[in-house]
Image: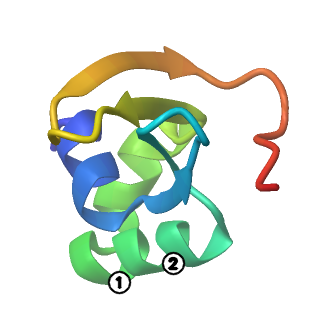
């Protein structure tokens, strides 16, 4: 399963105050992903769940990266 597809479907969305959204896996998103794909598939992608994406207001993915810090949800 491609991690970007999982992020777009199950990821938490927060507004970035610049017209876009930041998507990332929070605890609830990880739980939804585990229920949808099962434990074996979840374990195969678990180390990639620090991925985030920035999506523009038109729905286009602007960037994808690996989180090293907590996302500020103000």
- What's the residue at 29%, 57% (across, down)? 41
Q: Circle 2 sits in a helix, a strand or a loop, which is it?
A: helix
Q: Residue at x 61, y 42 (%)?
A: 17
In this view of the protein, which residue sits in the foreground, 53 or 3?
53
Looking at the image, is 51 positioned above or below residue 38? above
Q: Quadrant of the N terminus?
A: top left
Q: Where, quadrant-wise, is the C terminus in this rendering?
A: bottom right
Numbered badge on residue 35: 1
Gap between marks 1 and 2 measured at Cα: 6 Å
Task: Indicate left or right for 70 with 29 as reference.
Answer: right
Q: Is residue 58 left or right of residue 33?
A: left
Residue at mark 2: 31
* Residue 68, percent from left and from top: 78, 21
Relative to 5, say whether 4 is above or below. above
Image quadrant of residue 26?
Answer: bottom right
Image spot of residue 62 (x, y percent): 30, 18
Left or right: 22 in relation to 17: left
Report the residue at 40% width, 42% height from top.
45
Q: Which mark is residue 11?
A: none
Q: Residues within 10 Å of mark 1 (few under 14, many from 20)?
A: few
Give the percent coordinates (x, y) of residue 16: 59, 41
User: Element at badge 1?
Assistant: helix
Count of all numbered marks drawn on residues in the image: 2
Q: Is residue 39 above or below residue 51?
A: below
Residue 32: quarter of image? bottom left
Colour logic: rainbow
Q: Position of residue 55 (x, y in %)?
A: 32, 35
Q: For residue 69, which quarter of the picture? A: top right
How packed mark 2 is, by other alpha carbons closer than 10 Å (few <14, some 14-19, many 20 or more), is few
Looking at the picture, tell me which residue is in the foreground, 54 or 48.
54
Answer whether labels 1 and 2 touch (C-beta < 8 Å): yes
């Amino acid at each position: 399963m491609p991690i970007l597809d999982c992020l777009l479907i199950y990821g938490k969305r927060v507004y970035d105050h610049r017209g876009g959204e930041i998507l990332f896996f929070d605890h609830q998103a990880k739980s939804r992903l585990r229920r949808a794909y099962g434990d074996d598939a979840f374990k195969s992608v678990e180390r990639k769940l620090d991925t985030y994406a920035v999506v523009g207001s038109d729905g286009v993915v602007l960037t994808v990266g690996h989180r090293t810090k907590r996302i500020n949800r103000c």
